[in-house]
Image (cartoon, rainbow, N blue to C red):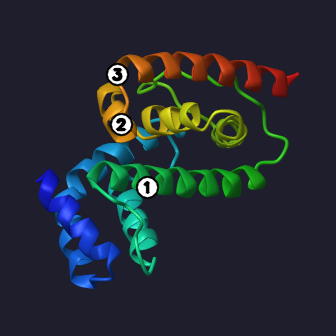
C-alpha cells in the first residue's frame, strides 16, 4: 500500500483529480487513528468525532489545487497539521466565548488518553509550538507529529527520515522546552 499511496500522491501533485479521489479510501483508517489522537487531547465536551475531523481534513486538503505531499508519510504529516489547525481554530472560537474562564495546567504527556485539555491549553501549546519552530524546526515537527499527530517514535522517525534515538532525544528536549515556556507564560 505504501507504494500505491505514494504513486497516487505524485499523480495528485501533478494535478490528477482522479488520484485525489482514489487516495482517501486507502488512507482513511490511518487518518481516523490520527484524528483520535488529536481528539483525546481535547475536552470531553468537544463536538468533533474522529470521523468529523477526518472529513474536515478531507475537505481542507481537497480544496487545495495541488497537494505538496511527496510520499505517504509526508501526506500523514500534512493531514496531522491540518487536524491541529482545525482543532486550534475550534479552541480559539470556543475560548473567545468563555473569556475569563479559569486556567488549567498543561501536561505534555503522550499518554493523555484519560486527560482532557481546555481550549486555552490547546491554544497555548499551539503558540508554544510556533515559537519552538522559530528556534528549532525539527523539535517542533517532532512534537506536532508525536504529541498532536499521535505517531509513535518510530513512525515520527520514519516521517522525518532520522533515527528513533534522535526522535526520542528531540521529544525529551521539546517537552522540557515547552514545559518551561508554558510555565513562564502563566506567571
Q: Position of residue 97 (x, y in %)?
A: 75, 55
Residue 167: quadrant of the picture:
top left
The reply to whether residue 50 is in sight is no
Instruction: Tell me whether circle 1 and circle 3 mark residues in contact (CB < 8 Å).
Output: no
The residue that label 2 is drawn on is 161
Q: Position of residue 15 (x, y in %)?
A: 33, 82
Which numbered mark, 1 or 3, is in the foreground of this view?
A: 3
Residue at coordinates 16% horizontally, 51% vertically from top-left? Answer: 2
The residue that label 3 is drawn on is 164
Please say if 104 is above or below 118. above
Residue at coordinates 36% horizontally, 52% vertically from top-left? Answer: 74
Q: Position of residue 124 (x, y in %)?
A: 71, 37
Q: Earlier in the sequence, mark 1 or mark 3?
A: 1
Residue closer to the observer: 117 or 20: 20
Which quadrant of the rendered structure holds the N terminus?
Answer: bottom left
Residue closer to the observer: 75 or 91: 75
Q: Secondary structure at mark 3?
A: helix
Residue 153: quadrant of the picture:
top left
Q: Residue furthest right?
A: 187
Which numbered mark, 2 or 1, is in the foreground of this view?
A: 2
Q: Secondary structure at mark 1?
A: helix
Marking on residue 78: 1
What is the distance, in whole Å, between disc 1 and disc 3 at their CAs? Answer: 20 Å
What is the distance, in whole Å, between disc 2 and disc 1 at their CAs? Answer: 15 Å
The reply to whether residue 51 is in sight is yes
Q: Secondary structure at mark 2?
A: loop
Amino acid at each position: 500500500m505504501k507504494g500505491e499511496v505514494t504513486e497516487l500522491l505524485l499523480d495528485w501533485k501533478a494535478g490528477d483529480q482522479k488520484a485525489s479521489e482514489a487516495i482517501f479510501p486507502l488512507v482513511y483508517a490511518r487518518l481516523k487513528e490520527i484524528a483520535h489522537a488529536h481528539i483525546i487531547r481535547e475536552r470531553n465536551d468537544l463536538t468533533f468525532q474522529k470521523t468529523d475531523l477526518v472529513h474536515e481534513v478531507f475537505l481542507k486538503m481537497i480544496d487545495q489545487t495541488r497537494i505538496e505531499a511527496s510520499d505517504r508519510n509526508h501526506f500523514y504529516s500534512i493531514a496531522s497539521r491540518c487536524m491541529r489547525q482545525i482543532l486550534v481554530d475550534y479552541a480559539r472560537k470556543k475560548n473567545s466565548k468563555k473569556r475569563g474562564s479559569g486556567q488549567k495546567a498543561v501536561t505534555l504527556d503522550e499518554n493523555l488518553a484519560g486527560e482532557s485539555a481546555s481550549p486555552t491549553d490547546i491554544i497555548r501549546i499551539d503558540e508554544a509550538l510556533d515559537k519552538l519552530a522559530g528556534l528549532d524546526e525539527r523539535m517542533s515537527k517532532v512534537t506536532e507529529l508525536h504529541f498532536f499527530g499521535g505517531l509513535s517514535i518510530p513512525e515520527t522517525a520514519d516521517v522525518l527520515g532520522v533515527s528513533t534515538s534522535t526522535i526520542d532525544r528531540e521529544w525529551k528536549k521539546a517537552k522540557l522546552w515547552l514545559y518551561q515556556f508554558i510555565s513562564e507564560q502563566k506567571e
